[in-house]
Amino acid sequence: MTNNKHSIHKYTLGGLLSFILAMTVATVWAQQSENERFGKAPDVPEGPLSAEVVEAIDVAFIHSMRDSAWGEDQRDALEIVVASGDPRLGWIISDFMRFIPDRNLNTVLADSARRLLELNASNSAHWGLITDQLIAWDIPAPPDYLRVKRSIFTATLPSWDFIFQEGDVDWRHVSWGGVRIDDRPFDNTSEPCNCIPAADNPAVVSAKDATWPDDDDIVFGVVVNGEARAYPRQIMEVREMVNDTLGGRDLGIPYCTLCGAAQAYFTDELPEGIERPVLRTSGLLIRSNKVMYDITSGSVIDTFRGTAVTGPLAEKNITLQQASVITTKWSDWKEAYPETTVLAEELAMGRDFDFRNNRDANGPIFPVGDVDPRLSVHEDIVGAINASGTPVAFVRSTAMLALTKGDEVEADNVRLTLEAGGIKAVDKEGNDLGSHQAFWFAWSQFHPETTLWGL
């Protein structure tokens, strides 16, 4: 390799937050309507890549990540990729750009993607905009895409290798969220990590002894077999994942700050021979939704739907059942459930984040592509799946107003009820449907066929 001008990825993952946020798409969402058209997609060829292009991909993207350098050989290879005129290769350029802090090299890569995808300059400023275009146009992945993507990602963090496996995952949409994987063993979450630190078997206190939450603080309330527990948003924005036991049942509780969604999955009562899944944050995202995995089996589980998509759990067609999560104020929750427990203050680790009203206030900060235009991207909805498997979303503000007035709110055999100052969904017989609150962009992209109530 000659002329090693750029060192491309030897940096500390945990020390790049300012760079990561600077390279995301929040400013785009602040400046553009979410309904803005992405333009006409370029023509996409079918079939295999030529041997010359395959070799160029390896030189430009895989060898350079392996050797941590970019030089003349890589520039020549990149020109071969662009000259192919194959928009499918835009995915590889996009993946590669995610790990390149060198601004000059990013400019070269962005210009290459612009030419390959026939974009104007304003649509190719950085990784996030390019990825948004690829998602919105639904450009197919190139042949052998997973191998190339795995090589790019694991060159930065080898411990991701088991994540990038064949399965029911659209790997085009998976990106890096800017943090390392949390791979600490179960019940060892007191050990520090350069990751988003899950909490296992968290310490709790009674409502009467919980002097630290303010009455107006938002909590995520869960009730299992009559036992209630509050998971304060301040803690969940730090931890993003809790493995707990409540009402005699094991639970995994992910919170995606980007999606405004806390969910509660039962991780017990699974088929014989399956060990309890222990949920962790991978450090990866799929369309601005966290990618979680089970450290017990090494399986990736769809965070929004609870369905295993890779690994042994996917092979056994495991989908975790959900319990309802009530998003409400601490004052309302403890009034409705005076015997509730609440996570102990020390679990916040001295931090007090408010991503929803600060970092995420102007829209998704990672690529999501086109968004269902029926609602704004950050409209709060309450979502549930009915008995026949149909997803149903209710505009939370409209539903809350109707329920407070005493009106009935129902769609597709899903009925909403007031619960501890929040909302939950039940079926016609009053059975819990495992509902939760989320931003519209997240619910609609994972449930594109959803019924929508409240327009």
Image: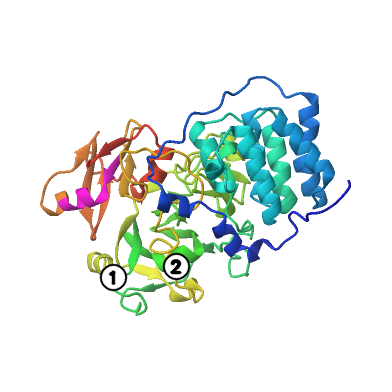
Query: Which disc number belongs to residue 394?
Result: none
* Residue type marked 1: Asp
- Whether residue 382 is visible to the viewer of this picture, yes or no, is yes
Q: In this view, does 134 lie to the left or right of 194?
A: left
Which of 321 and 417 lies nearest the eye of the viewer?
417
Q: Is residue 112 above or below residue 214?
A: above
Q: Residue shown at 65%/29% (left/top)? A: 142
- Report the residue marked by disc 2: 235
In this view of the protein, can residue 252 be seen by the observer?
no
The residue tagged 1 is: 216
Residue drawn at point x = 36 percent, y = 69 percent: 341
Instruction: Report the residue that reaches farthest toward the left.
Output: 406
Do callouts 2 and 1 mark residues in contact (Cβ within 8 Å)? no
Q: Give the range drawn in magenta.
A: 393-401
The answer to which quarter of the image holds residue 184 is bottom right
Position of 305 relative to 137 (above/below): below
Q: How many marks?
A: 2
The residue positioned farthest toward the front in the image shown: 121
| Front-most of residues 246 and 212 | 212
Residue in front for this viewpoint, 75 or 211: 75
Q: Where in the figure is residue 161, as x and y percent of width and height?
A: 70, 46
Residue drawn at x 50%, y 63% is 239
